[in-house]
Every structure is written in C-alpha cells, then in structure tokens.
Image: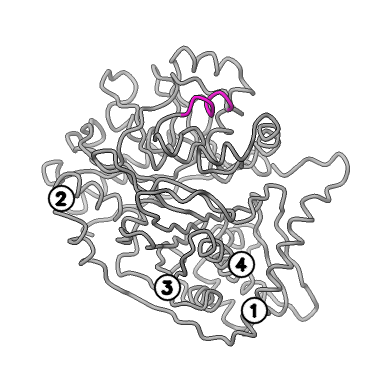
Amino acid sequence: MVSIAQRLHHQHHPRPGWVEHDPLELWRLTCRVMVEAFEAVDAGPGDVVALGVTNQRETTVLWDRRTGKPVHHAIGWQDTRTADLVTRIGEETDPDEVLRRSGLPLATYFSGSKLRWLFEHDPDLHAAAARGDLLFGTIDSWIVWNLTGGAGSADAVHTTDATNASRTQLMHLDTLDWDEDLLELMRVPRAVLPTIRPSMGAGPRTVQPIAGIPIAAVVGDQQASLFGQAAFSPGDAKCTFGTGSFLLLNTGASRVPASHGLISTVALTETDGTATYALEGSNAVAGGLVQWVVDNLGVISTPAEIETLASVVPDNGGCYLVPAFSGLFAPYWDPMAQGVLVGLTAYVTRHHIARAVLEATAFQTRDVVAAMNAASGLTTPKLTVDGGMTSDNLLMQMVADQLDIPVVRPMMAESVALGAAYAAGLAQGFWDDREELLKQWRVAAEWVPSVPAERREREYRGWCHAIEVSRVWGRLRPAGAAPPG
C-alpha cells in the first residue's frame, strides 16, 4: 500500500430500525478520497494500471436517470423497515424456492424487499421505473455510474457484478442473471436493473473525478476481503470484523446449497464469466455495538477504550448482551428478536458489561463457524481475520477461546481494498496469476486458545440462553405496540 484516504459518512436513523445513507454524500466522499489518495503520492491517471471498486452490498439506491438525483435516501443493509413486508412475501410464495433460486432466505437484509417497499409506498416510482426513467443499484452501481459520467453523459455505465447482484435476492445463482420469477415476486421492472458483468475484466474508463483510469474490477466488500486474504481454494475461509461480522468460506466452482442458516453466494466471476461460490454467515452488529456504547451510553469516549475497560475483570460476571438491533442474522434469521442485556446483579459493573460487549462478537462468531462446519462437512483448522476490530487483542483472544482454534491476522489489514486491487490488477495483467499473490500474504499476529474446555462451554451455554431470551422478548410486545422497525 502506497497511499490511503478514508472519510466517514453519516448514518441516518429517521425511525427506530431504519438505517439510511445519503447517496450524494457517498459520491462526494468517493471523489474526495480518490483525489486525496492521488495527491498523497503525487500520482496521475497514467501512473495507475487499473481501478477496483468494492462496496457495501445490499444497500439500495434508486435514482433519476436524467438528473442523477436519488429519489430517496439509500436504504442500508441493516434497515428493518421491511419486516412486515417480508412476512407478507413469505405468504405469497414458497420461501424454500426463493432460497433455492437466490441462495438467500427471506429477510430484511437483502435489496429486493427494500426496492418493493419503495415502489409500494410511492406507486409513481414504480411507473417511472417501468418506463426506464429510474435506475436501481447497490452502491457499486451508483458509484460506477457516476465515475463514468453520471447524469448528462450518454456513456455513463449502469452495471453491477454477480457478487453484488447475488445479494439483491433478484438474481438466480445458477444462471447469474436476473430471475423473472423473483422480479415478479418483488414487483421490480427489469428496465430499472443494471447489467450484470463479470467481477473482473476490461471495463469502462473513469470520467470523474480523475479521468482515464480503466475500471477493471467490481466486487462486493466481503467477497473482496476473501480475495484479499488470498483465500483462493475451496475450504479457505476468512472473517471480517467491522460494523458487522462476515465469515465467508470458498466452496469452489460448485455452489453448496444454503443450509444451517447460512447464505450461498457468488465469491467472484472471472473475465470469462466463470463463477466461484462461497458460503457466508453474517451478523449485523459487531463493531457497531462498540460504537453504540460510545454514542448511546457514553461509558467510553472512543471505541479503542472498550478493551481497557473490559480487561479489568476476568469474566462477564454472569451478564450477556445480545445486540439484536436489526433482529438476528446467521444462523438464526429471526427478524423479531430484539437486543437484550441479561444476567444483571448488584455485582455487575461497567467493566463486566464492557466485557459482555466484546464477548457478543466472539459468541456470534462461534455460532457461525459451527454452522459453517456443519453445512460444508469441513472443520475449520484456523480462522483468518481482518477488519478494524482485529486491533482489539482481547477480542481476538476471546474469539480463539470460543472457537478453540487459532485466529490469524495478516500484515495487510485493509483486505477489502486489497482484494479489489488484486482483482483489478489480475484483470489488467499487472500480476501474472494467483500464485504471485499468495506469496505476498504474511502473518502479523496470531492468537491461540487459552481457556479450559469447561469454562468455554459454560460461557457459551449462557450465551445460548441469552439468545433464547432475545427471541422470546421480540414476540412479547404489548398489544398494539409497533413491531421492530
């Protein structure tokens, strides 16, 4: 890595359970960080072989083709406003058939129900979409469209790749094309959809903010992380700990049917369209829980302080925190579950609660790894990790202790950006093959299990009881109370 530029964007929460972003802000910040990264090393377009784009996946953007203005804030992947709609969709169709075609369970997580929600709440939008006046995309489509000229440009490209399209619940995993039955189910006109292209390959050149760079790869963020971790072979796995946590297992050229609460997804498509598949287990809240402690509780002023606070005590004092702010994701897929803090006694201090905050991520990771092993028939010998939370040594030790396997972090922490760069560089011939990339992978840190089996299982049983409370609590709303989201 020769240069890095990063900018935070705002999260909008207009109602409980709603999570929105401003697409125009995302585009402005994209322009800013591109320029800053170039200026940091005094580079110009001629110094760059290729651009790789990676992005938040399920977040839904709908914009006017002529003006380039979004018709609504982007609806984020954590947003749960479609909970009732998803229940209704499940009554209109066979959920197992949706799972078979798309690899995804019916859930608020994915783009299709978000798009149907927009159309149902404003029928004029559906009519405009059917006429071809509106464009839909996940964040990659929005960014690439703007990079290639945007509004007023006849050359602006409206595309996506299969890693992102596979997260919309509108694409068939076998054909790698939009599925007519799924489109009908979600009430989505085909005219609004981007063209699905390979993740890697010769693409258009940028027009703005820096012109002339070939866009040679577009990959969803977690698939890019898998690629950046050099997990090229079937059986290779990684887990990213960011706002949420995302564990992906490379399953090779044949997709493993979704089971045990896991998602079947596309890991990458080559220049010739050949697909590699993956199993994925996602949780909505990991680092987001630590940020919640900062923003909403005020117990600490920065996320980094959570490790210091939690290190004061040797255990959680019997308290558990289930961060089901958007329901429970893998392997439970329970949109009705709600966040709970249980096991409180007069003995419990803020130090115990801080420890429970970190342990929630470790327990969620164990849930997903157990499901991954059961679904794939494989036993994960170690877990390769990346993301901002991996700088928390206590958390990584907790993960190793709960999984009872080593946890390994590579030298290059920015594996999402690295994966997009690897894919773009391979497509443009900057690197010859994957073997060249494998040689670049280096270990930065490793954590090995250190707690007795009896303690590990006792602590995990407490977590399982807390999960039960979370799921029951979400179903005990008073009569007339609004549902989550």
State yes or no: residue 408 in magenta.
Answer: no
For image coordinates 61% across by 20% down, the residue present is 122
Q: Which residue is mark 1?
A: 457
Given residues 253 and 122, the one toward you in this image is 253
CB contact under 8 Å: marks 3 and 2: no
Contact between labelled residues 3 and 4, with CB atoms less than 8 Å apart:
no
Picture coordinates of residue 366, whole percent (x, y):
56, 68
Kindly identify which numbered label has been placed on residue 360: 4
The N terminus sits in image quarter? bottom left
Disc 4: CA contacts within 10 A as few (<14), some (14-19) or many (>=20): many
Please name the residue that numbered disc 3 is placed on.
382
Q: Which residue type does callout 1 highlight?
A: Glu
Query: Which range is magenta?
Result: 179-185
Q: CA distance from mark 1 to mark 3?
A: 19 Å
Residue ID at (36%, 28%): 195
Mark earlier in primary sequence (4, 3): 4
Q: Nearer the viewer, mark 2 or mark 4?
A: 4
Is disc 2 surrounded by few (<14), some (14 to 19) or many (20+) residues within 10 Å? few
Farthest residue toward the right? 479
Q: In the image, 315: left or right of 413?
A: right
Check whether the beta carbons of the residues at disc 2 and disc 1 lie within 8 A of each other.
no
- Marked residue nearer the N-terminal end (2 or 1): 2
Task: Give the residue drawn at x 63%, y 67%.
Answer: 299
Rendered image: mark on residue 102: none
Does residue 476 lie above or below 69 as drawn?
Answer: below
**Is residue 288 positioned above or below 86 on the image?**
below
Cα separation between marks 4 and 3: 20 Å
